[in-house]
Amino acid sequence: MTKDKTSQEDLEGQWSEDDLRAEVVRLRQELRDSREETLRLGRRVSELEAQASSSDALQITKLTCPGGEPDEQDKRRVLDHLRSEAYVHLAVSPIAGVGVFAFRTIPVGIDPFPICNPHMGSKEQFCVCSGSELRGMPPGVCDLVKSFFAPLTEDDSWTPQTDENGEILYGVLATGMNSLNLSWYLNHSDNPNISFKDADDEGGFNSFVTNRQIEAGEELVNDYRELGKEFYALVIGGG
């Protein structure tokens, strides 16, 4: 009789080593499939929202649908944002290349990269691309993508996800390389003053939170280990 693995979780201690390994492989594949399905459904929802926004029968207000012309309330929010939430700029970094620096004091416990009027922008969506797909890009593109977009990781937030061929999977911003905000230029440090924070909602914007008060002139740095083993190995020269 074929063993019903899903109904015998309490008997796992009686499985053979080969059975246990096979079950781990099966569950990992189910997890990957579910994530890909979630991404697919997210894209479908975005498509339907776009259709609904252009339909006379299904009117959606500016505050719930991306796009539309900014009004006076949007303008007031922008002015407030510039007055109290603009903290950083890009400059040459002693760590590597370009970095993110504070031009005024940033308090502890806040996001230095807040999105103003998020209803005016599109959702932050990612396409899952394999290492083999990226290697087919023109010279320099693959390295550039890997330097900005960390591999997707398993639930341990460290081990990179792979496809059925063992190729590492990367989450590439669906809008491409030219829509990155300043947070994408954060450099690595073993003593970070800012931490990564996942988006609260599907399709929402990822963010960061300051670990301490950051003074004007300081470079903002985070620990790339938060983004997984493969990305960390790349930036310290081991990838």
Image (cartoon, rainbow, N blue to C red):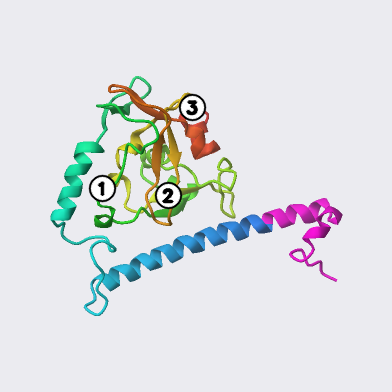
Q: Earlier in the sequence, mark 1 or mark 2?
A: 1
Q: Is residue 189 above or below residue 209?
A: above
Q: Which range of residues does the magenta coloring cover?
A: 1-25
Q: Is residue 108 above or below residue 202?
A: above
Mark 3–mark 1 CB contact (< 8 Å):
no
Q: How far separated are the C-alphas under marks 3 and 1? A: 34 Å
Crowd around label 2: few <14 · some 14–19 · many ≥20 (10 Å) = few
Q: Is residue 82 above or below residue 191?
A: below
Element at badge 3? loop
Identify the amino acid type marked 1. Answer: Cys
Mark 3–mark 2 CB contact (< 8 Å):
no
Identify the amino acid type marked 3. Answer: Ile
Residue 116 disc label: 1
Place of residue 17 in the rendered image (x, y in percent of width and height, measured from the top left): 81, 51
Place of residue 227 in the rendered image (x, y in percent of width and height, measured from the top left): 49, 39
The residue at which mark 2 appears reads as 199
Name the residue nearer the viewer: 109 or 47.
109
Left or right: where 31 falls relative to 68: right
Q: Earlier in the sequence, mark 3 or mark 2?
A: 2
Q: Residue at x 59, y 57 (%)?
A: 31
Name the residue nearer the viewer: 43 or 131.
43
Q: Earlier in the sequence, mark 3 or mark 1?
A: 1
Q: How far separated are the C-alphas under marks 3 and 2? A: 26 Å
The residue most toward the bottom is 57
Q: Nearer the viewer, mark 3 or mark 2?
A: 2
Residue 19 disc label: none
The residue at which mark 3 appears reads as 236
Element at badge 1? loop
Q: Residue at x 59, y 55 (%)?
A: 164
